[in-house]
Image (cartoon, grey):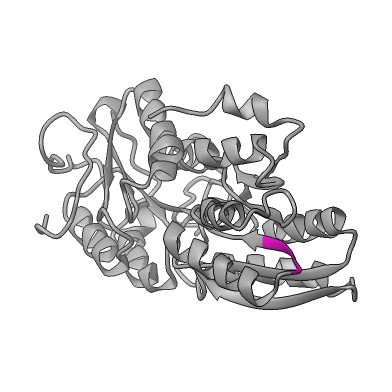
Amino acid sequence: MKKSLFLLLVVFGCELPPRQNTATTAATAVNQTKTDPGEEEYVLVTTAVTMPMYVNHDQAAFKRWGEKMGVHVSILGPAEWDIPAQINTIEEVLGTRPTGLLINGTNPAIASVIDKAVNAGIPTVVYDSDIPQSKRHAFLGTDWYQIGQMQGEEMVRLTGGKGKIAYMGILGLTNMEAGFQGLLDVLKKHPGIEVVGKYDDKANVEEAARITSDLLAAHPDLAGLCGFDSNSGPGMALAVKEAGKAGKVKITTVDWEPEHLQLVRDGVIHMLAGQKRELFTWYGAQMLYDMVHQTNRLSANDARAHITNIPTTVNTGLLRITKQNVDQFIHSTPSP
């Protein structure tokens, strides 16, 4: 791997072993070859591989799955949010002939390398955000439009349907843009709510705090803030607390890391739209395994019949976390 990449390996040895002749080279035979689980290698490729949310949820569940199934697993990717580096990692992984490939759908730009994996006969599942224009065999993740709807409905309830609202996240990402639209579709039904802005916090706590401070200065009567990435909530909460408006400015956001949960307990954040991230990688890996082992064959030869014998799209659902139920999640927060 290139020096610019930070690689987290969960395997026996310092690099991925070359694949045995258990993986086929023809895409038409991808799910027809049976293998010995002990010989198998399932690889997860993400970006920002050290992000606590990914480590504590996605990666922890993937490792637990590998231990349960008795197979080798690896987790690879750049340390920072770097899509070209993620693409390069996938390209290099293809040469090792993994038994199955689980890819975080970070950006539409990864579609072409996903297609390379599928064309090479490698079972490939995308999780978190779909890459629908790719040939991926399946997708598991959250319906981000529903995340936006949930935040919008909660904000209407918290504000009584009146006041100035702003929202932020990573602009341009397919999943977040869907979330923004879900929010707006709810808010537009309430003429008493004025949306004063859409902001790009670049998934950075300091940037989210800066944007929030500017908003509070420009709109002293700001009623609410909605966040769409894992750092939006902590950043918004920081600025609201510094302005002495904790609890007065209503905050809804995504994810449920320990910091988010504590801010809910403290009454600074009012609702979290939590993703069931453990399900992304546990069931994504299981779907890869089921493809390899033909667990549910649907015809005499599914590959020749152009049948993928796993679900093609899975909505893993949402968690609604408020001060009323936050303690249940604080005591059960996953550890690496």
Q: Is residue 58 magenta?
A: no
| Relative image position of residue 241 (x, y in whole percent) | 59, 51
Residue 296's image quarter? top right
Q: Is residue 40 above or below residue 136?
A: above
Q: Residue furthest front?
A: 244
Which one is nearer the viewer's eye here, 45 or 203? 203
Start-end of magenta stretch: 221-225
Asked if residue 272 lies left or right of residue 93, the reply is: right
| Relative image position of residue 30 (x, y in whole percent) | 36, 51
Residue drawn at x 62%, y 29% is: 329
Which one is nearer the viewer's eye here, 333 or 303? 333
- The image quadrant where one finds the N terminus is bottom left
Residue drawn at x 42%, y 68% is: 107
Residue drawn at x 22%, y 58% is: 89
Q: Main secondary structure of the magenta part?
A: strand
| Relative image position of residue 225 (x, y in whole percent) | 67, 62
Q: Is residue 42 visible?
A: yes
Q: Is residue 316 visible?
A: no
What is the total number of numbered labels drawn onto the structure image?
0
Residue drawn at x 86%, y 54% is: 157
- The image quadrant where one finds the C terminus is top left
| Relative image position of residue 136 (x, y in whole percent) | 45, 60
Which one is nearer the viewer's eye here, 277 or 331? 331
